[in-house]
Image (cartoon, helix red, strand yellow):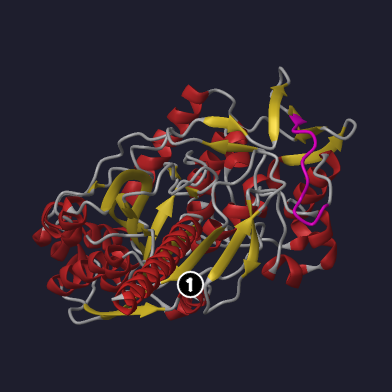
């Protein structure tokens, strides 16, 4: 009998020990899971359609590069979601009565992530680099032609002396390409260092970047604007639409660019995902190489415009999620005015070609950038439309670098598919880049002295209303000259996990991650 009681006591004690162990394991597993969950909440993964070609903010024009260096390199002022100007590295500013002198008071106690102090001298060094014509940097035309000199008053006051008043001056400074402030140490290190590993003052800094691999940012613990909400941001390049959507739905990524319209409803119905659809000031167009026959004739370029059924393009192909272009900039732009659009008239288009002596079956080469995925079906629509007009159109989708190299040589293309963004939220930069006769980025090879004069006149006109009148006239003349096939104003669809908050998207389609949290 005693043996039986001893046996029962033994098994009772063994069971108790087992339960204690299991409870401890369960608590440890729970704690581990909770810890893992908290770590994941501190990492944001973003799937983009294309990769950066360089991280030099003064020497690039592509959107993919701009999106990356905007995360770590800040500007003096910035655009908010409504397109208004807000202080950033400059906390206040004053303009002289004649509009030619601008004085900026800078934030104090700010450091670049390499420990270099941010001050007036750093600002001076940056702008003297980008506005020095001898450096031949891509963003020289934004401010270079109008800047006389930059001076400093102590450590925290910088003064821009302009040759003439510049109407969109603050908008230019808010543009995160050409105006980002990077560490003087990086600039001293030379072009290769700036291209691959520049240093800024932003909430995040580059941990890893190289073409063909993920870009990894890590939090800047000394950020002057407060502790970042995330430990890391990871950018992945995923060109395929279906792959990006799947990664979002499975939780592999937190944000994706360019949700296809066919997937928007399903993503929005899920409890785990959502789509933000935002009208931006981007227009899509097909540029026409004005320097090659027969496209050197305005009537031929007009014929291409008459051949496009824009209602079918916007309403059917894009399900009404975009709208017809009525100017070279979108109606979101602060300088917009309606220049009108070409009606669909295939017979008139054929008649114009016949009068110009264009023979049916002429071969035409159109190029498109591979990373601009959402634009490709519009390119195919234009290809089909021009084939109905009698052309034999070859559409080539090229990697971004190959595409940009192709556009540098006018003998290699007749047409090019491209998006035009007024990055300053002002028509000035689209006009200057795309239509000024000597601009490096005038890929349409368009030359019109009247338009050159309007661009220069509009830039130095201080009155907003007078600038609008100048640009209104220019928009209408460009429409008649038809250097582009004008297509539509764009809307972007950004896919997100439901727990992602506070992504700021400006009308210029810049994604601001400074306040993002999960």
Quick one: 365 or 284, which is closer to the camera?
A: 284
Residue 478: in magenta span: no
Q: Quadrant of the N terminus?
A: bottom left
Q: Is residue 307 visible?
A: no
Nearer to us in this view, 2 or 35 = 2
The residue drawn where x is 74% and y is 29% is 104
Identify the secondary structure beneath mark 1: helix
Span of residues in magenta? 105-115
Observer able to see residue 55: yes
Please, which residue is most extreme toward the top here? Answer: 97
> Residue 270 vs residue 406: left or right?
left
Q: Position of residue 341 (x, y in %)?
A: 23, 45
Identify the residue position indicated by label 1 in the image: 407
Establish if 128 lies above or below 464. below
Q: Is residue 458 above or below residue 362?
A: above
Along the horizontal axis of the image, is 422 left or right of 323? right
């Amino acid at each position: 009998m005693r043996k039986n009681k001893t046996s029962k006591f033994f098994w009772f004690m063994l069971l108790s020990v087992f339960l204690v162990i299991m409870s401890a394991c369960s608590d440890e597993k729970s704690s581990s899971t909770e810890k893992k969950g908290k770590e994941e909440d501190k990492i944001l993964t973003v799937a983009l359609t294309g990769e950066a070609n360089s991280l030099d903010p003064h020497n690039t024009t592509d959107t993919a590069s701009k999106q990356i260096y905007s995360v770590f390199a800040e500007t003096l002022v910035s655009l908010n979601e409504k397109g208004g100007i807000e202080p950033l590295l400059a906390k206040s500013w004053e303009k002289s009565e004649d509009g030619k002198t601008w004085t900026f008071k800078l934030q104090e106690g700010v450091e670049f992530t390499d420990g270099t102090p941010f001050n007036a001298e750093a600002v001076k060094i940056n702008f003297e680099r980008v506005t020095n014509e001898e450096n031949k940097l891509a963003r020289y035309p934004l401010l270079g032609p109008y800047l006389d000199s930059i001076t400093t008053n102590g450590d925290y006051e910088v003064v821009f002396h302009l040759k003439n008043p510049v109407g969109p001056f603050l908008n230019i400074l808010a543009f995160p390409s050409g105006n980002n402030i990077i560490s003087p140490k990086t600039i001293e290190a030379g072009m290769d260092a700036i291209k691959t590993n520049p240093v800024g003052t932003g909430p995040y800094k580059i941990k890893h970047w190289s073409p063909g691999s993920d870009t990894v940012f890590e939090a800047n613990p000394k950020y002057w604007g407060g502790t970042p909400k995330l430990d890391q941001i990871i950018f992945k390049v995923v060109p395929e639409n279906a792959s990006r959507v799947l990664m979002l739905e499975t939780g592999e990524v937190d944000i994706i660019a360019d949700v296809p319209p066919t997937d928007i409803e399903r993503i929005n119905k899920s409890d785990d995902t959502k789509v933000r659809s935002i009208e931006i000031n981007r227009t899509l167009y097909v540029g026409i190489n004005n320097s090659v026959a027969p496209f050197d004739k305005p009537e031929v370029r007009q014929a291409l415009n008459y051949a496009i059924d824009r209602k079918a393009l916007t309403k059917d192909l894009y399900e009404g999620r975009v709208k017809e272009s009525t100017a070279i900039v979108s109606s979101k732009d602060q300088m917009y005015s309606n220049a009108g659009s070409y009606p669909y008239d295939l017979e008139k288009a054929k008649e114009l070609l016949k009068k110009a002596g264009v023979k049916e079956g002429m071969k035409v080469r159109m190029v498109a950038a591979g990373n601009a995925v959402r634009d490709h079906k519009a390119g195919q629509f234009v290809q089909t439309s021009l084939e109905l007009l009698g052309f034999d159109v070859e559409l080539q989708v090229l990697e971004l670098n190959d595409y940009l190299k192709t556009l540098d040589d006018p003998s290699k293309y007749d047409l090019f598919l491209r998006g035009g963004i007024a990055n300053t939220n002002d028509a000035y930069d689209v006009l200057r880049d795309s239509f000024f006769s000597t601009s490096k980025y005038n890929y349409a090879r368009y030359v019109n002295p009247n338009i050159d004069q309007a661009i220069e006149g509009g830039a130095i006109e201080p009155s907003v209303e007078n600038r609008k009148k100048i640009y209104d006239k220019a928009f209408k003349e460009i429409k008649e000259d038809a250097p582009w096939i004008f297509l539509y104003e764009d809307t972007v669809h950004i896919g997100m996990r439901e727990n992602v908050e506070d992504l700021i998207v400006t009308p210029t389609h810049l994604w601001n991650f400074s306040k993002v949290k999960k």
